[in-house]
Amino acid sequence: MHSITTLPDLPGRRVVVPGGTGAVGEGVVRSYLAAGADVLVPTRTQERAEEFRRVLGDAATDHLHLVVHDYTTFAGAEQLADEMQRRLGGIDDVVAPIGGWWAGKRLWEIDESDWQSAFVGLAAAHVAVLRAFLPRLNAGGAYTLIVGESALTPVPGSGLVSMEQAALLMMRQVLQAEAAGRQRVFALVLGPVRTRLADSGDPDRVSADQVGAVAVAVSAAAAVDGREILLRGRAEADQALALLQGAQPVSTGTVVAVSTMEAKNGRREDLVEVLAELAPQIRAEPGCLHYSVHRARGDADGPLLAIQVFASIEAFTQHSASVAAQIPRIAALLATSPVPPTLFEPVPQPAPTEGVGNGEKSHVC
Ligand SMILES: NC(=O)c1ccc[n+]([C@@H]2O[C@H](COP(=O)([O-])OP(=O)(O)OC[C@H]3O[C@@H](n4cnc5c(N)ncnc54)[C@H](OP(=O)(O)O)[C@@H]3O)[C@@H](O)[C@H]2O)c1
């Protein structure tokens, strides 16, 4: 089960994994440790801390920071974030596999204690961690929620799980809209996972280590915008890894498309509106890693700059075909005829010298 293969190197990266002691969390913690990151795992009880250290065995190196602390309240999460900043000097990423399964009652049969523990308590823990940590993340870091596919599909008898997980997916969308361009926020949507607690042995199912490998790849792929990533089985996990690993700065296939657009007199707001309307569709296209629209600093009237990053030229070509129908709408708002975007590719990097990358952070410009 613990066969962590090709992971990017993340030495010096500081990652917090609330819920890391759990069945899925274990794979996340192992993967970041294997990538050389410093991993802070808060847990609410001493017993759980001791058990988790035993579970990890030799993987529990000096880079594991296991802290007994209640991170599930607003005040508790804030104290933890302060403590981590003092101890490790900053925070780069958060991965939150908080909470587990609940089953046994139809919605009209639940009592208040079910509601408090399976919905309110878990949702509050997620919000507590989010509000304490998200504003502190360094540029290029990622905030990654872990949820189950019950967020997308109702599971009779486990309605509270579906409702709470669906709320987390909407929370991610809200964050993406509110923190656009500043923080990358992801959700990994899991099917049944092979873990230390439940291993069906089915090779088509995703394992906890594979979930961890995807989380590490998300951290490493600083050019990839926040999104939902479906990991309902092994095949989707492999696909996600290929996309994320292909998007790392060293990738030779990445295409950056840059367009400048000058609006007709009085039509700039309309142009901004159309571009904003197209954004979710473009970001959801296969191979789209990034889409953003910019203006010159402090200039509310001047030209706009659209930057799009695609994993490959094939993905960019497909994108061009799928937005072709929108070009007349955009052209009608432009001062001059539209021209195709200028395409850029990464400049090949010289081989790294010894020590380079150690402790350095990647930055999204
Ligand atoms: N296991 C699967 O097959 C599977 C499949 C699909 C989706 N998922 C999703 O993956 C995430 C983690 O699931 P898991 O199976 O790893 O769960 P788990 O084994 O129960 O672990 C969850 C961890 O969350 C922490 N936690 C904090 N507040 C909690 C609360 N109020 N109730 C329960 N746990 C709380 C606990 O850590 P401390 O006690 O140490 O603080 C616990 O170790 C969940 O969102 C789940 O829906 C799991």
Image: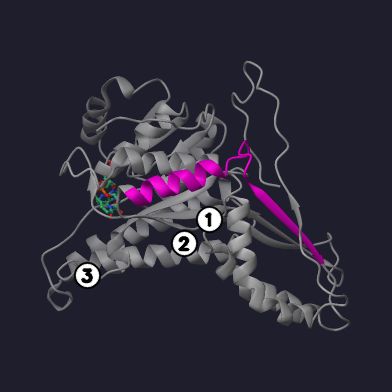
The residue located at (88%, 75%) in the rendering is 336
Is 357 in the magenta? no
Give the side of residue 61 with respect to residue 106, left or right.
Answer: right
**Residue 226, disc:** 1
User: Can residue 92 be seen in the rendering of this structure?
Assistant: no
Which residue is outermost to the top?
354
Q: Earlier in the sequence, mark 3 or mark 2?
A: 3
Q: What element carries label 2?
A: helix
Residue drawn at x 72%, y 56% is 257
- The residue pinned by badge 2 equals 172
Name the amino acid type tagged 3: Gly
In-image side of 338 versus 197 (left or right): right
Q: Residues within 10 Å of mark 2 (few under 14, many from 20)?
A: many
Q: Which residues are drawn in magenta?
A: 235-260
Q: Is residue 307 above or below residue 31?
A: below
Estimate the spatial distance between the alpha carbons at disc 3 and disc 1, rounded to whole Å: 27 Å
Asked whether 343 or 69 is in front, the reply is 343
Amino acid, disc 2: Arg
The CA distance from mark 3 to mark 2 is 20 Å
* Contact flag, marks 2 and 1 (Cβ < 8 Å): yes
| Residue 245 x, y percent position in the rendering | 51, 41
What residue sits right under mark 3 in the picture? 159
- Distance of mark 2 from mark 1, alpha carbons? 9 Å
Inspect the image, locate mark 1, and give the three-letter code of the amino acid beneath it.
Gly
Tell me what residue is drawn at x 42 percent, y 58 percent.
Answer: 127
Please state if 188 lies on the left or on the right of 280 as rendered.
left
